[in-house]
Image: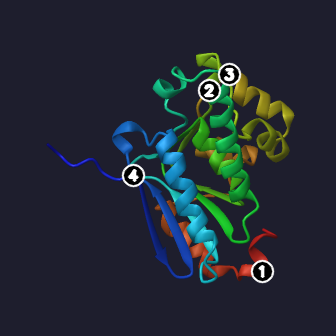
Amino acid sequence: MSEIPPSLITEIIEPVGIIRFNRPAERNPLSLSTLSELETSFSNLAARSDVEAVIFTGTDDVFASGADIRELTSLDSSSAREFSKMGQGLFQAISSASQITIAAINGFCFGGAFDLALACDIRLASSSALFAHPGARLGIITGWGGTQRLPRLIGRTHALDFFATARRVSSREALEMGMISDIGDPVLECALRFCSRHPKKQRRQI
C-alpha cells in the first residue's frame, strides 16, 4: 500500500516561510483536517520573528481547491456555521498578519482556495493558472470572505460576473481585471524574487 502524502509541506528559506499544498491527485482540497493543519502551520510561521513573508503555493498543476464537497454534504446547520467561521478566522489571520503574505498560484485555484488567495497581500500566478468559484453550479456560495474581498479588489460588476457564472478565468484575464499582480514561471521562484527585491517595510505598500 502506497503511503499517503502529507496534505501540507512547510519549509523556511530565510526569511521566507513556504506552505505548499501537497495532494494534487485530489486537487488539494481545503478539507477540515487540511484547514486545521493550515491554521497550525501558518500560526507557527506568523509567530516567528525571523520570518518576514509567507508564501502559499501548490503542487504540480494545482494550487488548491475549496472545501471537500463530500464533507459539506454531511454538515448540519450548526457544523456548517462552525466550518465557515473556521475558514473566516484563518483567512482573516492571514490578511492581518504582520508578515507579507503571497499566493504563488501555480495552477487550478478554485473555490475556497481563491478565497485564500484573496486574503493574501500579493497574488502571483503561473501562465497556466486558472481561477473559478464553482459554487453557483453547486447551489452554494463561499463563506470564507471572498464575496467581500473580491469586489473591493476588482469592482462589483466583475466580481458578480465571476461568482454568478462560475466560469474559469485565465491568468491573463485575471491580470487584466486586477485579480493578480503579475504572471511568471515558475511562479514560486517569482514569489521568492519578489521577497528578495522589496524590503519588509515597503512590501505592504505595493
Looking at the picture, how far across and down is residue 118, in whole percent?
70, 49
- Residue assigned mark 2: 167
Please tell me which of labels 2 and 4 falls first in the chain: 4
Decide if residue 170 is in sight here. no
- Residue assigned mark 3: 165
User: Residue at point 60% right, 83% down?
Assistant: 50
Residue 22 tag number: 4
Q: Residue furthest left?
A: 1
Which secondary structure, mark 1?
Answer: helix
60 vs 118, left or right, is left
Toward the viewer: 121 or 194? Answer: 121
User: Residue at point 73% right, 52% down?
Assistant: 92
Q: For mark 1, does the 10 Å Cα neighbourhood hold few (<14), some (14 to 19), or many (20 or more) residues?
A: few
- Residue assigned mark 1: 201
Which secondary structure, mark 4?
Answer: loop
Q: Nearer the viewer, mark 1 or mark 2?
A: 1
Which secondary structure, mark 3?
Answer: helix
Please tell me which of labels 3 and 4 falls first in the chain: 4
Name the amino acid, label 3. Thr
Looking at the picture, how far across and down is residue 184, in whole percent?
54, 60
User: Residue at point 46% right, 62% down?
Assistant: 186
Q: CA distance from mark 1 to mark 2?
A: 37 Å
Q: Residue furthest front?
A: 78
Please tell me which of labels 1 and 4 falls first in the chain: 4
Q: Up-down: is 140 above or below 162?
A: above
Decide if residue 180 is in sight here. yes
